[in-house]
Image (tube, rainbow, N blue to C red):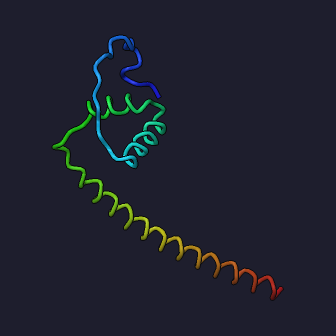
Amino acid sequence: MATAFASRPAATMTARVVVMMTPAEKLALEERSREFEVSPSEFVRQASQKFDPGFDDSIFETIALEIEANNAAMRAQLRGLADRIDATIAAMDELRAVK
């Protein structure tokens, strides 16, 4: 994954920031940065530039609930279709047996 900071020479990055966190948080940071194929430092740099404390992510929960409800409805429809297919197959088997 390309990063916004990839073209900047490492020599210009001389300031250091120490962030205290629990070992579990550090492990989560390392795992997350690996998922994006960047170093933990790069991950923190990019995340800090994109952080918006005013962003309301509650909309995601609403969307997730709607998706879950839609999935449940689709599963019910699929079960109904599967039952109809089974009934059709059984009826066809009966017709074949009569011949």
Residue 57 at x, y percent in the picture: 24, 50
Task: Say which of 13 and 36 sits in front.
Answer: 13
Image location (x, y in percent) of residue 33: 43, 36
**Seen in the image, is 7 located left or right of residue 96?**
left
Hey, which residue is sitting farthest right in the picture? Answer: 99
Is 29 on the left or on the right of 61, as rendered? right
- Give how far across and how far down residue 61 sits, in percent: 29, 58
The reply, left or right, for residue 29 in relation to residue 79 is left
Taking 62 as reference, is 38 above or below it? above
* Image label count: 0
Looking at the image, the residue that sits furthest to the bottom is: 98
Residue 68 in which image quadrant? bottom left
Quarter of the figure with the C terminus: bottom right
Query: In this view of the protein, which residue sits in the foreground, 21 or 55?
Result: 21
| Residue drawn at the location 29% of the way across and 23% of the way down | 16
- The residue positioned 44% from the left and 25% from the top of the image is 2
- x 47%, y 29%: residue: 1
Please, is residue 13 above or below residue 2 in the view?
Answer: above
Residue at 37% in and 14% down: 8
Residue 58 position within the rendered picture, expressed as x and y whole percent measured from the top left: 23, 55
In the image, farthest residue toward the left:
54
Q: In which quarter of the image is residue 72?
A: bottom left
Q: In which quarter of the image is residue 66?
A: bottom left
The one of 82 and 62 positioned closer to us in this rendering: 62
